[in-house]
Amino acid sequence: MRRLLAPLAVVALLVATGCGEEKTVLAPACTDSAEAIVTALEKAPGPVTLGDGTTLSRCVDQARSDVELQSLGMVLTSAAEQLAEQRRMVALGYLVGAARRGAEHNGGVGTELVRRLEGTGRLVGDGPDLRRGLRAGNASG
């Protein structure tokens, strides 16, 4: 009987631990501050990375838990609002494009966050600078 239970216990343990599934951890720079995001976006439409080298799309991709999504959402939404207020359309477009790119890779977990960021972009219109930023963020964000 023990010989039969041992393999079942191993299988149960593998299932419980996710069979070695890689667990992502949200980089601390992603939720550091909205100001840090806004400052990093000064490089847009060129490639934008945060202080530790993390791309904005990677931040969205890595945010999996409700807590991570909420923290990231607060920071990115605040950054988007600041950019819209300052009329920095290329940077705002880049942020939205990078968020779209990241959400594509995390099974749609970040879709609501992307919608909120897109809403901020719609408040300021759909000009050529915003579109240029969107293209750059989609490409390298």
Image (spheres, grey):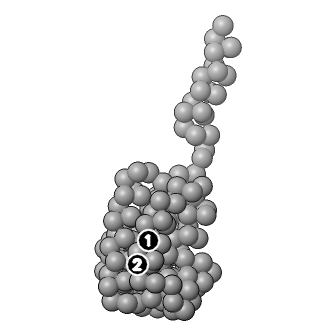
Query: Residue at position x 49%, y 75% from top?
Result: 96
- Residue 46 appears in the figure: no
Dot 2 amino acid type: Leu
Residue 108 visible? The answer is yes
Question: Real-space Cα distance between discs 1 and 2?
Answer: 6 Å
Tags 1 and 2 touching, CB below 8 Å = yes
**Which of the pair 116/3 is nearer the observer?**
116
Q: Is residue 93 left or right of residue 139?
A: left
Secondary structure at numbered mark 2:
helix
The residue at which mark 1 appears reads as 119
Q: Residue at x 60, y 78 (%)?
A: 138
What amino acid does circle 1 point to? Gly
> According to the image, label 2 marks what residue?
123
Say if 98 sits above or below 126 in the image.
above
x, y percent for residue 25:
46, 58
Which residue is located at x 66 percent, y 7 percent? 1
The residue at 43%/66% (across/down) is 116
**What count of labels does the image hold?**
2
Q: Which mark is residue 71?
A: none
